[in-house]
Amino acid sequence: MTQGSTLRGTAPSAEFDALIIGAGFSGLYQLFCLRDRLGLTARVLEAGDGVGGTWYWNRYPGARCDSESHSYCYTFSKELLEEWEWSERYPEQPEIMRYLNHVTDRFDLRRDIRFGTRVTTARFDEAANRWTVETEAGERYSATYLITAVGCLSSTNIPKIQGLDDFKGEWYHTGLWPHDGVDFTGKRVGQIGTGSTGIQAVPVIAETAKHLTVFQRTANYSIPAHNAPLKPEFKRYVKENHPAIRALMHSTANGHPFAIEDRSAHDLTPEQREAVYEAAWAKGGLQFRASFRDLLVDKAANDTAADFLKRKIREIVKDPQTAAKLSDIDHPFATKRPPIDSNYFDTYNRPNVSLVDVRAAPIERVTPTGIVTRDGATYDLDVIVFATGFDAMTGPLLSIDIAGRDGRSLKDVWSAGPRTYLGLQVAGFPNLFTVTGPGSPSVLCNMPVAIEQHVEWITDCIAHLRAGGVKRIEASADAADRWVDEVNAAANATLLPLANHSWYLGANVPGKPRVFMPYAGGMARYRGICNDVAAKGYEGFVLSR
């Protein structure tokens, strides 16, 4: 085996047992498992100049995790859990980067990561039973196993707006933020987008901008994070209870360290229900949606939460017209990614912040000096911030030219929407594994929990193949078809499809097929299904020697 990497621009291939694309949470753990647990030669190819994955690129103002810090971490190492200490309830991007760099150095992973290496193509050679990968710089690598750890939210979605190239000011996408930051002092800023990212960015940009104009297409719910430094007693509780916390996260539908209350919103009187919501609002965070078991399956139950949150918006925002725009929400609560915030709605009470409803008057074009909407209104701007999200789940995979058996491209196979088996493999693409791919719980879950499950399943699978002299594993087309049906059935058993402009459906990207992509049956149930498949000799997969 040739373990050294080739020089840029040279043609010879470096050969490994496994290649991993991406050095975020997924890629780092996958490297550790394959190299340190199975003893394989493995190389991570990472486009960025450092580890971190989505957190390496997402350095926008206010970037912060929406999972509580004690749950947003690896749980595979007792020593790692005991030695690392988070500082806040919801960690900021710099702290998450410090954590991931600590993990990288603690387990000596950096030596097997090639930074600044963007993968452009991946081809399966059936005769050799190997994947050949090429990079933007012309390097070639080959491996028996190819694992994509490219993340679900890493392919930026920049709207095609007429005139953007003519804009004389600066423009940025939150997912590709300059590493040295952006100074908004004294500038007129226009932010497009009010999803999770936009809701985090608005309060921070408003602090220094001369004026901030927020262009809102879709009004959104948001719950206060009530972020704060962690108290010593809570840190002590976490260190003393890691096994119980991990067991709880593994038992819940969304992988968070709290259970959904086993009660219906209809079980209480309106006054009792209001008290529950008030307490959940005061506590803050994603646990609000765990107040009742039926919020995501019963529209009438959901309406009770939605009405409460809309009333909160109208109470906070002083200007009635602005409050009306912000609370004119057209989808059930939590059917889109549910944001949490630090003073988002309060920010609209600042004199230097204004809101534009671009559903009523869409953006028509960008001019050299700003933005014009369809009603003829003009907005003079020095900076435009696109908080317009990502080509989620499929975008990061389809940005690589991947071809499987008989040269069939993944782009063609997924032309009508993604089709996977368990979100782990695609029929026609042997020995290719996708960590948290479409068809897995992924974005509906606390991501490190989903990532650890996927990586461990893939690692156990490869160990099984090697122990049995099996050279190739591939999802069967029938199994993939059945799983797509299961994913659709799980989604349709909830209210999630009612948010018909959600990125869960790909609706934020023009021309993208409208298919519900994540598995909504819950992480705990999904884990059981995957374990059962493996216990039955990898049922639904074709194994060949």
Image (cartoon, rainbow, N blue to C red):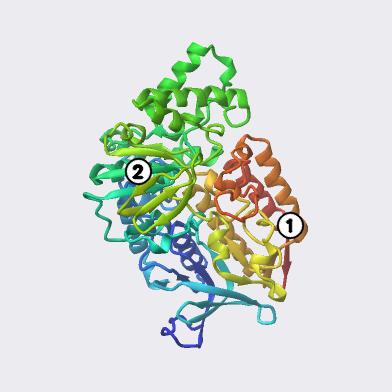
What amino acid is found at the position of numbered circle 2 in the picture? Thr
Q: Going by the picture, which residue comes out furthest to the left?
A: 186
Q: Is residue 360 above or below residue 113?
A: above
| Residue 72 x/y as whole percent | 41, 46
The answer to whether residue 87 is seen in the rendering is no
Secondary element type, mark 2: strand
Q: Residues within 10 Å of mark 2 (few under 14, many from 20)?
A: many
Looking at the image, which residue is at 56% across and 63% down? 397
| Residue 14 x/y as whole percent | 50, 82
Q: Is residue 301 above or below residue 453?
A: above
The answer to whether residue 257 is seen in the rendering is yes
* Residue 406 horizontal side relative to residue 154, left or right: right
Residue bearing the label numbered 2: 213
What amino acid is found at the position of numbered circle 1 in the picture? Gly
Looking at the image, which residue is at 73% across and 47% down? 485
Residue bearing the label numbered 1: 540
Number of on-image labels: 2
* Residue 345 horizontal side relative to residue 374, left or right: left
The numbered mark at residue 192 is none
Q: Is residue 350 above or below residue 370?
A: above
| Residue 430 x/y as whole percent | 67, 69
Secondary element type, mark 1: loop
